[in-house]
Image (cartoon, grey):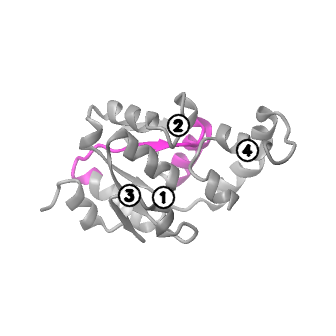
Amino acid sequence: EDFAQIIGRPFESFYDYFQARVALPAPQDLMAEYETVLFPELRRELRVFPDARNAIDSLIAAGVPQAIASSSHRERLDLMLDVSGLAQSFAVTIAGDEVERGKPHPDIYLLAAEGLGREPRQCLAVEDTSAGVQSARAAGMKVLAVSREVRSADVLAGADWVVEEIDTEQLERLTGLRS
């Protein structure tokens, strides 16, 4: 239940949620400790879902600009993009610590759309958390939600479409590349 409440939200929201339940070290101390455990794991274990990589590559080949709007802090986002080999795949990357209000507020998606030079209604967000779906919808975007193992489809209710895996042809239809 706790995981469902915090997934997809910025660290500050995660911290506040747990601070109300247990005593925690200062936020900067907890973040530093968390990163000393998490970053080596990301370097060893991070894998890109094959369907996600195929979709990203297909959209790049078609000339569709893409952005990342992540609740992760910049240092973690950059590490994940580097380790995954996707660092050069996105025209715009926005990290959670670069907006005043994180997901579920629309700020991060509005900034991503602006960086792409697009109106939010011209964008399709691909999300995997309830907070992300809420954020993209609040920004005025259509949302394709991906329901993988730990995230059930009902948690992503609010999305325009919920799928278990990204189908490249479906994504190309939704972005207008195919009719």
Q: Nearer the viewer, mark 1 or mark 4?
A: 1
Q: Earlier in the sequence, mark 1 or mark 3?
A: 1
Q: Secondary structure at mark 1?
A: loop
Quadrant in which the N terminus appears: bottom right
**Residue indicated by mark 4:** 35
Mark 2 crowd level (few <14, some 14–19, many ≥20, 10 Å Cα): many
Distance Cα–Cα, label 2 vs label 3: 22 Å
Q: Earlier in the sequence, mark 1 or mark 2?
A: 2
**Residue indicated by mark 2:** 95
**Residue indicated by mark 1:** 128
- In this view of the protein, can residue 40 be seen by the observer? yes
* Residue pictured at 55% horizontal, 41% vertical: 78
Task: Tell whether label 4 touches label 1 (CB within 8 Å).
Answer: no
Task: Tell whether label 2 touches label 1 (CB within 8 Å).
Answer: no
* Residue pictured at 60% horizontal, 38% vertical: 73
Mark 4 crowd level (few <14, some 14–19, many ≥20, 10 Å Cα): some
**Residue indicated by mark 3:** 159
Q: Earlier in the sequence, mark 1 or mark 4?
A: 4
Q: Which mark is residue 50?
A: none
- In this view of the protein, can residue 89 be seen by the observer? no
Q: Is residue 12 left or right of residue 116?
A: right
Q: Earlier in the sequence, mark 4 or mark 2?
A: 4
Residue type highlighted by circle 3: Ala
Q: Nearer the viewer, mark 1 or mark 2?
A: 1
Q: Secondary structure at mark 2?
A: strand
Q: Nearer the viewer, mark 1 or mark 3?
A: 3
Residue type highlighted by circle 2: Ala
Distance Cα–Cα, label 4 vs label 3: 31 Å
Residue type highlighted by circle 1: Asp
Mark 1 crowd level (few <14, some 14–19, many ≥20, 10 Å Cα): many
